[in-house]
Image (cartoon, rainbow, N blue to C red):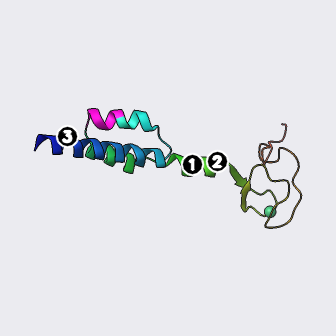
């Protein structure tokens, strides 16, 4: 009976590590945490923490300076308004302060 409980504990710990990896977290770190603490508590922690893969996609985008639609920072031509974009357009400040 104890053997089945240990196997289930390990299976759930591996599943939680896979769940964490799908959300952009370290597989090994979350597997160890899941084994040391509890797979259920660790799964809850992963579920309430922000999804890092979604954040990475969002940070690769910026609003177009012409139409304000979200486009890739590497874009040279806006797919929405067809405006040509200067190199490094996404790193420039949109409103520059005037000298006093
Ligand atoms: Zn645009």
Q: Report the quarter where the N terminus lies.
A: top left
Tell us which disc is closer to us: 2 or 3.
Answer: 3
Of the image marks 1 and 3, the number of the one nearer the N terminus: 3
Q: Secondary structure at mark 2?
A: helix
Residue furthest out toward the left: 1
Q: Are marks 1 and 3 in contact (CB under 8 Å)?
A: no
The residue sitting at 46% across, 37% down in the picture is: 26
Asked whether mark 3 lies closer than 8 Å to ligand 1, one says no
Q: Are marks 2 and 3 in contact (CB under 8 Å)?
A: no
Q: Which numbered circle lies on residue 6?
A: 3
Q: Is residue 58 magenta?
A: no
- Disc 2 crowd rating (10 Å Cα; few below 14, some 14-19, many 20+) is few
Q: Which residue is mark 1?
A: 55
Q: Quadrant of residue 64?
A: bottom right
Question: Looking at this view, is 60 or 86 the one in front?
Answer: 60
Image coords of residue 48 (percent x, y):
38, 49
Q: Which numbered circle lies on residue 59?
A: 2
Q: Are marks 2 and 1 in contact (CB under 8 Å)?
A: yes
The residue sitting at 38% across, 46% down in the picture is: 46
- Cα distance between the residues tagged 2 and 1: 6 Å
Q: Secondary structure at mark 3?
A: helix
Tell us which disc is closer to us: 1 or 3.
Answer: 3
Q: What secondary structure characterizes most of the magenta part?
A: helix
Question: Looking at this view, is 94 or 14 the one in front?
Answer: 14
Image coords of residue 75 (percent x, y):
80, 53
The residue sitting at 34% across, 32% down in the picture is: 32
The picture quadrant for ligand 1 comes to: bottom right
Q: Report the quarter where the C terminus lies.
A: top right
- Disc 3 crowd rating (10 Å Cα; few below 14, some 14-19, many 20+) is few
First to last magenta residue range: 32-37
Q: Which numbered circle lies on residue 18?
A: none
Relative to 52, residue 70 above or below: below
């Amino acid at each position: 009976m104890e053997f089945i409980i240990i196997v289930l504990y390990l299976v759930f710990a591996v599943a939680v590590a896979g769940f964490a990896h799908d959300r952009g977290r370290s597989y090994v770190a979350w597997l160890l945490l899941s084994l040391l603490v509890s797979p259920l508590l660790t799964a809850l922690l992963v579920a309430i923490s922000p999804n890092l893969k979604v954040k990475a996609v969002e940070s690769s985008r910026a609003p177009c300076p012409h139409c304000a639609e979200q486009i890739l920072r590497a874009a040279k031509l806006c797919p929405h308004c067809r405006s040509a974009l200067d190199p490094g357009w996404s790193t420039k400040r949109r409103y520059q302060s005037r000298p006093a």
